[in-house]
Image (cartoon, rainbow, N blue to C red):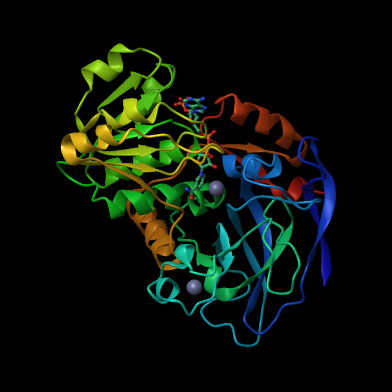
Amino acid sequence: MTDVDAYVARSADGPLEPGTVTRRAVGPHDVRIDISWAGICHSDIHTVRGDWGEQTYPLAVGHEIAGVVAEVGAEVTGVAVGDRVGVGCMVGSCRECDNCRAGREQYCVEGFIDTYGAVDRDGSITQGGYSAGIVVDQHFVLSLPEAIPFEKAAPLLCAGITTYSPLRRWGAGPGVRVAVVGMGGLGHMAVKLAVAMGAEVTVLSQTLGKRDDSLRYGAIDHYATSDPATFKELAGSFDLIINTVSASLDFDAYLGLLAFGGTMANVGAPPEPAPVTLFTLFTNQRSFAGSTIGGIAETQEMLEFCAEHGIAPETEVISAEQINDAWERVLKSDVRYRFVIDTSTLGQ
Ligand code: NAP
Ligand code: ZN
Ligand code: ZN
């Protein structure tokens, strides 16, 4: 076991502080990774603040990890010391249930093991990417294509796959009218990915402030949801809505924007239940759906798709001491569009 530098939460409401986390010795199927970059996902904040339930502290969060392989176990194949690799939201699953066998580890019937804040097989609490290193079973290690700039790869491991998976599942492509609700870390990736898939993309944001960016990323339009006229003008006009908003919405109002047979796929994860009026679903035979991250094979597919199409997140690189300020900015929707921590600044 080794202690590595980290930035940790010691309570639900205090600031994150420098600390360490303990990593297990490398087992036969394990890969030890020196972490270079760690993205800041809104889920990190929800988790630490207790939005989704009580946590055990101290806790290092972070599940958008890009780094370099430092050591491999005796039975590891396909990954070598020096390789650039990634780790996303999962570090384990049963590997035997129908979903695991089908490559949908994120829907493992026993529940997948989250990269942070979950009980690991040895009974310890998993610790995430706001740290200098991590030890992960090789099955959950992704290979990073050379074409993707290193620090831009990290956000793909959550924001990228979480939007890629529902876009594929609900058929985003030519002739499909997609609305992306909320243009933050996930939302801006949803726009870029859906555009690359050939869909007709519209952004629904709280204000018009991000309009230029939406159009630059290939959206055909951008509307302000603070303007009630938006909901009248766009009624019944989308085949697929990807909702990435971290807060509760008037879900019926958004469902009213779906055309016949349309689906609202939710990935945003506010703590409250989502009230929906069934009569809104009866109209146009609409579906209200959800999706969580993506499987390991699908994540690798997404990375190759991004490399092939030249897709990368917009990132703002920060040092460890800026993490608390960055969290405040995420909470104010003031990030364009993903903070990435330079983990070489941990422990300084
Ligand atoms: P983010 O960067 O903070 O983006 C969320 C965006 O939602 C904001 O940029 C803002 O966009 C909009 N928004 C925020 N507060 C709002 C409000 N009160 N009303 C309307 N719109 C609001 O967060 P993120 O990292 O993309 O994560 C988004 C959500 O997805 C979080 O809840 C996160 O936990 C969840 N998530 C889920 C999964 C999954 O597997 N399902 C995976 C990762 C993350 P505008 O400025 O454009 O309005
Ligand atoms: Zn995430
Ligand atoms: Zn399973």
Q: Is residue 195 left or right of residue 157?
A: left
- The structure residue drawn at horizontal position 58% and vertical position 82%, both measured from the top left corner, is 76
Picture quarter containing residue 193? top left
Q: Is residue 158 left or right of residue 75?
A: left
Task: From the viewer's side, name the closer residue of 268 and 27.
Answer: 268
Q: Position of residue 37 (x, y in %)?
A: 63, 50
All told, the count of numbered labels is 0
Q: Position of residue 249 (x, y in %)?
A: 44, 28
Q: Quadrant of the N terminus?
A: bottom right
Task: From the viewer's side, name the closer residue of 34 and 237.
Answer: 237
Q: Position of residue 48 (x, y in %)?
A: 70, 43
Residue 203 appearing in the image = no
Q: Position of residue 266 (x, y in %)?
A: 40, 42
Residue 102 appearing in the image = yes
Task: From the viewer's side, name the closer residue of 232 and 45.
Answer: 232
Picture quarter containing residue 214? top left
Task: From the viewer's side, name the closer residue of 315 and 137.
Answer: 137
- The structure residue drawn at horizontal position 56% and vertical position 57%, both measured from the top left corner, is 89
Q: Quadrant of the C terminus?
A: top right
Picture quarter containing residue 103? bottom left
Is 185 rendered above or below residue 307?
Answer: above
Q: Is residue 224 left or right of residue 17?
A: left
Residue placed furthest toward the bottom: 74
- The structure residue drawn at horizontal position 76% and vertical position 45%, both measured from the top left corner, is 345
- The structure residue drawn at horizontal position 16% and vertical position 44%, both measured from the top left corner, is 174
Is 313 rendered above or below residue 110?
Answer: above
